[in-house]
Amino acid sequence: MTSDMLDIRMQENLQIISKLRLLDDDLMNLVFDKNIEATELLLNIILKRTDLKVLEVVAQREYKNAMAGGRSITIDVYAKDSEGKAYDIEVQRADRGADFHRARFHSSMIDTRMLKEKQKFNDIHDSYVIFITENDVIGEGLSLYHIDRIIEETGKKFEDGSHIIYVNGSYKNDSDPIGKLMHDFRCTNPEDMFYSLLAKQVKYFKETEGGRKDMCKAFEELAEKRALEEKKHIALRMIEDDELSIEKIAMYVGLPIDMVEELAKS
């Protein structure tokens, strides 16, 4: 690739970066990755607490399904607090990405990593799957929607420690902490944000040379990942046709033979 082409790509990336919001997972992942302070702020606001302490936070954490051919997930932001509780924080712009069954699946995948062999079931910690959605996917005009299991006959909570929360990204109320938070998630300009901690991080990635470089690198890695997934998808369709050898499929789609063999097994 020539230097002129690199310059053009860089300018295109910078234009995209200028329009990004925290509701876009490319920016959200970078802002919260390993950022304990920002994650504590987010969780304390959503959970209406002031004492929650985050010990670990990582973006794009992959959970592989142990079942052959089973679907795996990549969590936008995974966090763990001082009480051992686990948090899966997802941002979803498209309504279909916030499907209720998806929340259930994420919750179950997190639970599978909670216990080691021979640990008791009551050792499992609480887990929270939090979907921050651009639109009000539940449609009741509320800022938050808490989903917990209940005993139908009594109306009492079934205290199994599993929690799902939907945060309405379209909620507007500048006197409410959730309203301020969602305002900041919709902002493209860090100068317009309420929470200085979030504004500082967004400003770094949008307006500094180092931050922009990190963003551009993330874009390139994402493009490569999507290209690889597309090749795998094409290879799977070719495998299903059962007309070509593994070697020819690998050659046509540009994948290593051992990767195509693994796809064929699944």
Image (cartoon, rainbow, N blue to C red):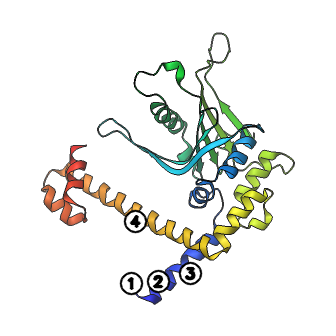
Q: Do tag 4 and tag 2 residues touch (Cβ < 8 Å)? A: no
The correct choice, above or below, for 90 with respect to 4 in the image is above
> Left or right: where does residue 76 sit relative to residue 248?
right
From the image, tell me which residue sits under label 3: 11
**Which residue sits at x=49%, y=31%?**
114
Residue 160: give its label.
none
Within 10 Å of the Cα at label 3, are there few (<14), some (14-19), or many (20+) other Cα atoms? few
**Residue that extends furthest to the right in the rendered view of this protein:** 175
The correct choice, above or below, for 149 with respect to 203 in the image is above
From the image, tell me which residue sits under label 1: 1
Marks 4 and 2, how far apart in space? 16 Å
Name the amino acid, label 2: Leu
Asked which secondary structure carries label 3, the reply is helix
Within 10 Å of the Cα at label 4, are there few (<14), some (14-19), or many (20+) other Cα atoms? few
Marks 1 and 2, how far apart in space? 7 Å
Marks 4 and 3, how far apart in space? 19 Å
> Which numbered disc flags the more N-terminal residue, 1 or 2?
1
Asked which secondary structure carries label 2, the reply is helix
Q: Do tag 1 and tag 2 residues touch (Cβ < 8 Å)? A: yes
From the image, tell me which residue sits under label 2: 6
> Which numbered disc flags the more N-terminal residue, 2 or 3?
2
Depth order, front residue of 36/238: 36
From the image, tell me which residue sits under label 4: 224
Question: Quadrant of the rendered structure where residue 81 is?
Answer: top right
> Which numbered disc flags the more N-terminal residue, 4 or 3?
3
Name the amino acid, label 3: Gln
